[in-house]
Image: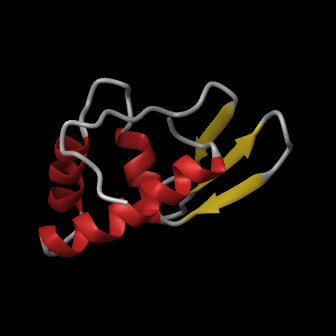
Amino acid sequence: MSISDNKVFTLADSVSFQPLGDNEGAVVLLVKSGDIFTCNDTTTAFLSALDGKTNFAQSLDRLVDQFDVDLDLLRADIEKLAANLVEEGIIV
């Protein structure tokens, strides 16, 4: 799945997202199903950047500043992550 730089994501309405602290990841609860997911720091940072206003490219800029990683590698990884999160109904 290729994601446009202008695509804006936000958490789905039926999702509860709780960061656990620095370097501790986060927990995501799908309220309707009761499914719980744990997140690593990268996923936590991505989900934290989603405010319904910031586009995908801006989110990547924030993440590349936060993590010492090549932008192209980050883009590929976050595109896969975003596709999985959309499929699970965590982001829209």
Residue 9 x, y percent position in the rendering: 39, 35
Colour style of the rendered protein structure: secondary structure
Left or right, 29 with reference to 34: left
Residue 90 x, y percent position in the rendering: 60, 43
**Picture mark count:** 0
Q: Nearer the viewer, residue 74 or 80?
A: 80
User: Which quarter of the picture shows residue 52?
Assistant: top left
**Residue at x-position 38% and y-position 28%:** 51
Left or right, 62 with reference to 40: left
Residue 71 x, y percent position in the rendering: 13, 67
Q: Quarter of the image containing the N terminus?
A: bottom left
Does residue 81 appear anywhere in the picture?
yes
**Residue at x-position 17% and y-position 42%:** 58
Vertical relation: 31 (above or below) 68: above
**Residue at x-position 21% and y-position 75%:** 73
Left or right, 57 with reference to 78: left
**In the orientation shown, which residue stands out farthest toward the front?**
1
Does residue 22 appear anywhere in the picture?
no
Q: Nearer the viewer, residue 27 or 13?
A: 13
**Residue at x-position 46% and y-position 56%:** 83
Residue 37 x, y percent position in the rendering: 69, 57
